[in-house]
Image: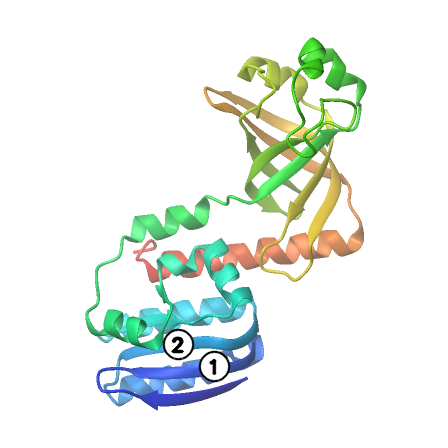
Amino acid sequence: MQITAEPRDAFTVLHLRGEFDTYYCPLLQQEIEALIKAKDVRVVLNLRLVKFINSTALGAIIKASKALQNNQGRLAIARPSPFVKEILEKVGLDRVVPIFASDEEAGAAVAAPAAKSASDAVAAFEDDESAVLFGLVDEARIAHFIQDRAKTMTNPLHGHNFGQNWRGIGRMLALHSDGLRFGWSGGNTGLSAFEMGQLLALGTELRVKFRLPLLKKGHCEAVVAVTELEERDDGVKVAASFHEIDDETRKAVQQYAEDMAYLKRELRQATGGDQ
């Protein structure tokens, strides 16, 4: 990766180009330290030509932002590439370091910094909105619990009537190397929270499909078994452990969990959550 500094009247633009990964994090840190030493603490990161970014690089951006703030400055991001923009928004980093469509807009923001809510940043990171697709391994349970409703309702995935290939759509709450947690509102099944709890009772095996936003890998698939279930007014919360998962996917999940834990710590530190 290359970094080029472009001084402006009231701020400096750092143009990054290439793949922003762990190896190049010290390079950004050196640039930020040099700017702070020169009392140039209003900085814009132009990420238009950044093709890839990993979790360590995201952490480096957070650290850069905090370092500038500690010196009465501010950091903003301008023109991120589509890949980078998607990653920044999915992990909630855009709530800590704002994103703008142009260098000028970003420069105006750092020249006149506005207060940000630390609690909003941490809450956004904690609330993962990634979809989890799930279906019952024992397909006979679908007909048993949904019964006649299956004849008149449609599957949210393919638009046809419910059948043995029924799938539910939940929201990821947590992901770790041994399993995952997700919430489910019941979709258009018409099931009450109690009935959802019966459908997804302890020990029930599910086929799940989910994404790892920070990795280039697409959807991951596994078989899990329900280990915890909580009935709520708006649906159920489910915890499940991996029963069948290939080695590559397990390694990817473990790396993702470590990345999230790392970014979570960095976000809390950046927003004063550990103070």
Q: Which type of secondary structure does the marked residue at label 1 adopt?
A: strand
Q: Which mark is residue 45?
A: 2
In the image, taking residue 54 as reference, residue 210 lies left or right, namely: right
Q: Residue furthest top?
A: 148
Residue 242 position, x and y percent, is 72, 40
Q: Are marks 1 and 2 in contact (CB under 8 Å)?
A: yes
> Measured along the vertical axis of the image, is residue 134 above or below residue 51?
above
Q: In this view of the protein, can residue 70 be seen by the observer?
A: no
Q: Residue at x 51, y 43 (%)?
A: 129
Asked which quadrant contains residue 68, the reply is bottom left
Residue at image position (61%, 33%) is 169
Q: Residues within 10 Å of mark 1 (few under 14, many from 20)?
A: many
* Quarter occupied by the N terminus: bottom right
x, y (%) of residue 268? 38, 56
Q: Quadrant of the C terminus?
A: bottom left
The residues bearing labels 1 and 2 have C-alpha atoms spaced at a distance of 7 Å
Q: Which residue is mark 1?
A: 16
Callout 1 amino acid: Leu
Looking at the rendered structure, the kind of residue marked 2 is Leu
